[in-house]
Image (cartoon, rainbow, N blue to C red):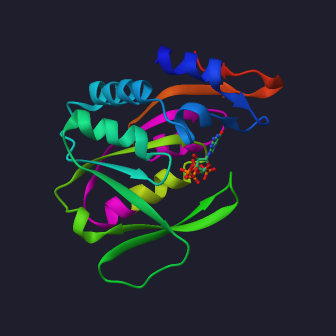
Amino acid sequence: MDFLKQMILDKGYIINNNILKVDSFLNHQVDFKLMNEIGLEFYNYFKDKNITKIFTIEASGIAPAIMTSYKFEVPMVILKKQTSSILNDDLYQTEVKSFTKNTTYNLTLSKKYISPNDNILIIDDFLANGEAAKGAIKLIEDAGASVAGIGIVIEKSFQPGRKILEDLGYDIYSLARIKSLENNKIEFVD
Ligand code: G4P
């Protein structure tokens, strides 16, 4: 997606060999035109998959996910990050470890917002190690629903997330795939 790649080159900046900051258009301030294009791009890729809901993980996945849900005209559901596990029959919950942030949280979903008939598209801002996506998949499959695919805005292809999810058989569509952030240079996968 050329518009996104150009914005990454123009406005993104490298913190170190592993971290790209995109606070001015995706993670803090949000560019509405870019979000609209992202929603359309995910819609065009996944439109024949009978998607019933869009799931995302708070917080930075919400902006691309809401625009995607608008294009599909289906609800968006935000998976919440709880600091402690909650024993509650009304919830699905699973523990997720973030290697990037060195934190652990309990990804949480109310049983009210999923049914076994759902065919769900997961949308998130970054794919690094795949832990957040694996957590979302677990909650969806615990509910007996299906994962139709995974849409990622920025994939760091030098980290293992894509391979792990592909090996599990999921369809992943990443709008920008970053090969390397080394030598203070952003390189995309061809
Ligand atoms: P994983 O889910 O693929 O395993 O990734 P990991 O746990 O390693 O990273 C999770 C968090 O770190 C996510 O934010 C993700 O957006 C963020 N992250 C990972 N790599 C980068 C990067 O290069 N740049 C930026 N800006 N963020 C990155 P989160 O904890 O879900 O927080 P939130 O921002 O969505 O609230």
Question: In this image, 115 relative to 8: left or right?
Answer: left
Q: Is residue 86 above or below residue 56?
A: below
Q: Residue at x 28, y 48 (%)?
A: 120
Q: Is residue 150 visible?
A: no
Instruction: Residue 109: give x, y in percent of width and height.
Output: 36, 66
| In magenta segment, residue 152 | yes
Q: How many marks?
A: 0
Figure quadrant of residue 33: top left
Q: Which residues are magenta?
A: 139-168
Instruction: Residue 189: give x, y in percent of width and height.
Output: 60, 20
| In magenta segment, residue 16 | no
Q: Is residue 58 above or below residue 84?
A: above
Of the 4 image quadrants, the one containing the C terminus is: top right
Q: Is residue 77 visible?
A: yes
Instruction: Residue 44: give x, y in percent of width and height.
Output: 28, 24
Residue farthest along the right direction in this orientation = 183
Question: In this image, 151 relative to 76: left or right?
Answer: right
Q: Residue at x 67, y 36 (%)?
A: 21
Q: Residue at x 40, y 59 (%)?
A: 79
Q: Residue at x 80, y 24 (%)?
A: 184
Q: Nearer the viewer, residue 143 or 38?
A: 38
Instruction: Residue 96: give x, y in percent of width and height.
Output: 55, 63
Q: Nearer the viewer, residue 8 or 106?
A: 8
